[in-house]
Image: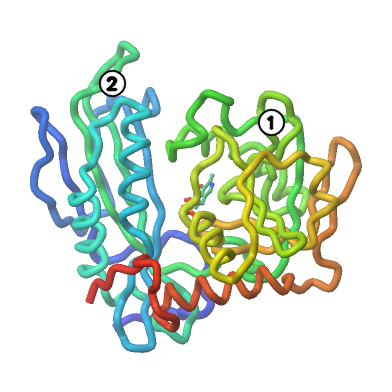
């Protein structure tokens, strides 16, 4: 039995019953282990603690009206974590091991999957860390892969209500040829100070510009950006943003709806031409953007005047959620049923 108030969950940590772990030692991955402790014991010289040999993922499981639990595009997360490992010289987690670990973590914590009616979901956090001791800057040969889960509500407190974002040229999230395209902890470390400044000024996130020229839109702190105009879904092409699985799915859904889609550099000035704009990601789902303030130039770009999401953002949101919760057919093969 749970005493969880499902419909008032926010995006925060909660202990579940079990987590799963797998160690890489002597050049190979071991067996999946089941743990109930939230603690990990790690060497003080572990490369994950010093040199950023750390990558993570985020995906969700949804309980349908039929009582089944559905994972959304888990193979895509497996591939992205593989790329993150390659990019930071870590032992890569094979796709099958990744998927098996995620499925096991969900099965073991079934009672934490929020009921269909709540609109909440189970957030799954796979994590890969260098655990071997090194003091010279070099990759280690020991790694720990873990998966833990928790029930969550909306990432931005507004949920599917438009929220405000801020542009500031004071900060970069990732370097042009750096690690922005993989999901490693260092990118998030670099986003903490700008994120904090945004929150203290009343914004939900920073919209980062490209680090080299500050001319193009990159992405939001924890999510990709999209704009909509003339029945076209436009999203940035940039080597320093995370290839969002949600964004890729929205591109497909927009095409299914007969829209044109464009993935290309978006100059900052183009913001003034969008009829709708939003942030998208696993945690954020779609967060419509009400306005973006460019605090350096003292300029605002407004997308929602009445506090409501735009019509197309709402259609995309509903389509995505319907597939995730099993209310609409899974025509693209995005769902893995867990139980
Ligand atoms: N961009 C960043 C920086 C993120 O942290 C995330 C979250 O994973 C995303 C984009 C969205 O990616 P996805 O849709 O795969 O969750
Ligand atoms: C996600 O959407 O899964 C993320 O990783 C975003 C944030 C919580 C880091």
Residue depicted at 65% across the width and 43% down the height: 195
Q: Secondary structure at mark 2?
A: loop
In which quarter of the view is residue 142 placed? top left
Question: Farthest residue in the right direction?
Answer: 298
In which quarter of the view is residue 279 placed? bottom right
Q: Is residue 148 left or right of residue 178?
A: left
Q: Is residue 291 left or right of residue 196?
A: right
According to the picture, the residue beneath numbered tag 2 turns out to be: 139
Residue depicted at 8% across the width and 48% down the height: 31
Residue depicted at 51% across the width and 80% down the height: 7
According to the picture, the residue beneath numbered tag 1 turns out to be: 171
Residue depicted at 74% across the width and 70% down the height: 310
The image shows residue 175 at horizontal and vertical percentages of: 57, 25
Answer above or below: position of 319 versus 78.
below
The image shows residue 100 at horizontal and vertical percentages of: 19, 57
Q: How is the image coloured?
A: rainbow
| Disc on the earlier residue, 1 or 2 | 2
The image shows residue 8 at horizontal and vertical percentages of: 53, 77
In the depicted view, which residue is nearer to us: 164 or 100?
Answer: 100
In the depicted view, which residue is nearer to us: 238 or 145?
Answer: 238
Report the label total. Answer: 2
- Neighbor class of circle 2 (other Cα within 10 Å; few <14, some 14-19, many 20+) is many
Answer above or below: position of 226 versus 338.
above
User: What label does residue 197 carry, if any?
Assistant: none
Q: CA distance from mark 1 to mark 2?
A: 28 Å
In which quarter of the view is residue 185 placed? top left
The image shows residue 28 at horizontal and vertical percentages of: 10, 34
Q: Secondary structure at mark 1?
A: loop
Answer above or below: position of 116 versus 157.
below
Question: Farthest residue in the top direction?
Answer: 136
């Amino acid at each position: 039995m749970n005493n969880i108030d499902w419909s008032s969950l926010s995006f925060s940590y909660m202990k579940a019953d079990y987590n799963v772990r797998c160690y890489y030692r002597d050049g190979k991955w071991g067996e999946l282990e089941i743990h109930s402790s939230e603690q990990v014991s790690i060497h003080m010289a572990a490369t994950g603690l010093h040199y950023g040999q750390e990558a993570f993922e985020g995906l969700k499981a949804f309980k349908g009206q039929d009582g089944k639990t559905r994972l959304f595009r888990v193979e895509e997360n497996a591939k992205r974590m593989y790329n993150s490992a390659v990019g930071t010289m870590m032992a890569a987690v094979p796709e099958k091991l990744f998927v098996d670990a995620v499925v096991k973590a969900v099965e073991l914590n079934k009672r934490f999957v929020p009921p269909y009616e709540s609109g909440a979901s189970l957030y799954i956090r796979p994590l890969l860390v260098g655990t071997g001791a090194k003091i010279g800057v070099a990759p280690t040969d020991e790694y720990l892969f873990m998966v833990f889960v928790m029930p969550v509500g909306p990432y931005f407190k507004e949920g599917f209500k438009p929220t405000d974002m801020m542009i500031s040229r004071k900060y970069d999230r990732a370097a042009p040829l750096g690690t922005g395209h993989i999901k490693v902890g260092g990118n998030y470390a670099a986003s903490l100070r700008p994120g904090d400044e945004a929150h203290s000024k009343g914004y939900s996130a920073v919209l980062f510009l490209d680090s080299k020229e500050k001319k193009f839109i990159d992405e939001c702190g924890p999510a990709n950006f999209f704009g909509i105009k003339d029945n076209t879904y436009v999203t940035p092409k940039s080597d320093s943003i995370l290839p969002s699985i949600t964004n890729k799915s929205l591109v497909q859904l927009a095409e299914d709806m007969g829209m044109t889609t464009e993935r290309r550099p978006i100059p900052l000035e183009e913001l003034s031409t969008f009829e709708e704009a939003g942030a998208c990601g696993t945690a954020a789902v779609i967060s419509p953007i009400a306005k973006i303030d460019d605090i350096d130039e003292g300029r605002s770009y407004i997308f929602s005047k009445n506090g409501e999401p735009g019509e197309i953002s709402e259609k995309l949101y509903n389509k995505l959620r319907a597939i995730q919760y099993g209310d609409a057919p899974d025509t693209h093969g995005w769902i893995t049923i867990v139980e």
